[in-house]
Amino acid sequence: MPPMSERRYSQVGWSFSIVLHGAIWLFWAFLGVTPPVIEERKISLPLGMILSQEPSPLLSAPTPAPPPVMPLESSEPLEIPKPSLKNPAPHPKPLVKNRDKMAIEPKVTPLMSQERESISTDSLLSPAPLAVMEGVRETKEVEEEAYLFEQIRQIIQKNRSYPERARRRNIEGEVVVEFCLTPRGEVKDLVLVQSSGSAILDQHSLRLIEESKEQFPRPKESIKIELPIGYRLL
């Protein structure tokens, strides 16, 4: 334990400190002034302003102006050499007369070259008319064949009759015959290409062609015709 003297000094020190602080507070209370209180300052900025604000560009130091370029002063003047007239260049001769002659004289092409050119152009243009003529011939042949076929069909349709035996048995069918028609009006190579399934209708169709051939038109050349003949009961 500390001695009594030390404890007494500590008590006196504490008492003095308390009295001193109390006197200070009484002094401030007597003056009516509250002791200063340090307040914290807050700065609030909207978030959009902070995000959208771009950093200001740094000011760059001004670039020094380039030093002026001083023209070089030649100490000695330049000497311009004078043209020598010892050997003057020969003057060109005027060509007016030659130009007049060239302008007056017309250019004449020989007749042989013109004839060759005309022959060559004719030979180059000749295949086109031949092709056109061949196309015209083909179309004419097709038209003639179509006309002959239609005429023969109408003649057969006019002369055709339904066989009585096939009518009584209710036989129907279609027959296809083929034959060659000559310029003389002859019918050759008459054959049955497609049968109707009934001998009565097949034989009747072949006889119908033989009996009607005198009425057929005569082609310019021999032509092969394939003709269908149908039989239907109403």
Image: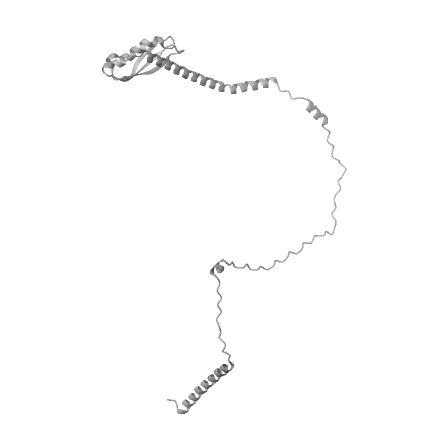
Compared across the picture, whether 92 is left or right of 226 comes to: right
Compared across the picture, whether 144 is left or right of 91 comes to: left
Position of 35 relative to 84 (above/below): below
Position of 83 relative to 215 (above/below): below
Relative depth, front residue between 77 and 224? 224
Compared across the picture, whether 76 is left or right of 199 comes to: right
Count of all numbered marks drawn on residues in the image: 0
Q: Residue at x 40, y 89 (%)?
A: 7
Position of 40 relative to 23 (above/below): above
Q: Work out which quarter of the rendered image holds the C terminus and state it.
A: top left
Residue 215 in percent (x, y) is at 36, 9
Residue 192 in percent (x, y) is at 29, 15
Q: Residue at x 34, y 9 (%)?
A: 213
Q: Work out which quarter of the rendered image holds the N terminus and state it.
A: bottom left
Residue 38 in percent (x, y) is at 49, 74
Residue at far left of view = 169
Q: Residue at x 42, y 88 (%)?
A: 11
Residue at far right of view = 86
Residue 23 in percent (x, y) is at 48, 85
The color scheme shown is one colour
Relative depth, front residue between 110 and 200? 200
